[in-house]
Amino acid sequence: MRMRQVDRDAPLQFLRTAYEPDDWIAVFLKSYETGHTAQRVGPVSLVADARFQAWLRWRNLIRSNIYVSVNAIRPGRRSRTRESVRAIRHVFLEADHDGSQVLAAIDLRRDLPGLSYVLHSSPNRVHVFWRVAGFTIEQAEALQKQLARELGTDVAATPCTQTTRVPGFFNHKPQYVPPHLVTIEYRDSTRVYTPDDFPIPIAPMMATVPVRLSRGLNVRFNRMDRARRYLAALPAAFAGQPASTFAPWTAPEWADSEFFVYDYCVHWPAPRAHIPGSRTASTLSEPVRLKPASSSMSSFTR
């Protein structure tokens, strides 16, 4: 079987789309056959230069895999350590299996914005990107870790120093014969998202909420996070509008009323809005005392 040709335009389009013109990035090369690695750090304009691209094509021809940093590097640095990251350019996840299922799960998430692009690194394996600005390193890593846990992607691929494959080159992992051409699917690639477009990671939030646990220690904190996200999908609530403005509403099966109301009361600022539903239709402007939903929780304190 004849191997497909390298796509010469794909790397250049990716560089133009994924980074700012004055960004510096790290390009990393690795051979799985020899173990040889190489790294170059420089401006996007240098990486896009015809001579640099020719060098990358030659290295890919002799079975080096071509990677690039997901985020921008500080000018003048020679590495892609955490301290060398200048700016977060992407919220990034790597699905090393069940790529199509991961994409379907993301599309169903009402609390997540649309993907910017999807890189197909190998059969049923994808790298997903949201173009972003205004993220700190800590914010980006916390969000990526949470989404990786929820969506079943690779938690080890959540540091801000992560690399991705460069589209247009071949994936030369030994199991792919012939090598797999890395491709990319652009979706909403012009929009740049901010932290406000994503759910707040639950772990940092829960660190500020005093909760007494019973011996079971099996509290389903993810339910509170899902309840919080469900509220985020009801914009009328945040405008202080009455429940009558909502369409007929039924609490989803995961929204235990205790979790649902408690999370709302603790985390969303005043003025409280009316929440539709017969059990929680009153205005929630005062602290609410709640009984535990099960024996796994002894009490909440506010």
Image (spheres, rainbow, N blue to C red):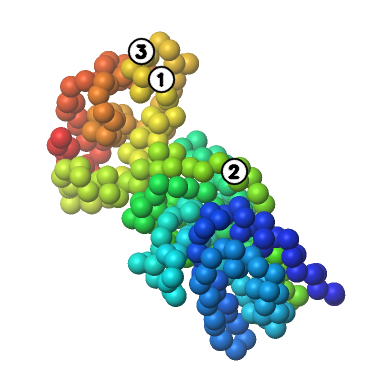
Q: Quadrant of the N terminus?
A: bottom right
Query: What percent of the width, then of the height, locates residue 101?
Result: 59, 51
Badges 3 and 1: C-beta atoms under 8 Å apart? no
Type of the residue with mark 3: Pro
Q: How many marks?
A: 3
Measured Cα–Cα span from mark 3 to mark 1? 8 Å
Label 1, residues with CA under 10 Å away: few <14, some 14-19, many ≥20: some
Q: Of callouts 2 and 1, which one flags the residue occurring earlier in the amino acid sequence? A: 2
Measured Cα–Cα span from mark 2 to mark 1? 28 Å
Type of the residue with mark 1: Ala
- Residue 128 in which image quadrant: bottom right
- Helix, strand or loop at disc 1? helix
215 left or right of 275? left
Q: Which residue is mark 2?
A: 190
Residue depth check, mark 2 versus mark 3: number of the one nearer the observer: 2
Q: What residue lies at 76% left-to-right and 75% top-to-bottom?
A: 178
Q: Residue furthest top?
A: 244
Q: What residue lies at 20% left-to-right and 30% top-to-bottom?
A: 290
Q: Nearer the viewer, residue 24 or 212?
A: 24
Measured Cα–Cα span from mark 2 to mark 3? 36 Å
Q: Is residue 220 above or below residue 177?
A: above
Q: Which residue is mark 3?
A: 242
Q: Of callouts 3 and 1, which one flags the residue occurring earlier in the amino acid sequence? A: 1
106 left or right of 267? right
Q: Which residue is mark 1?
A: 236
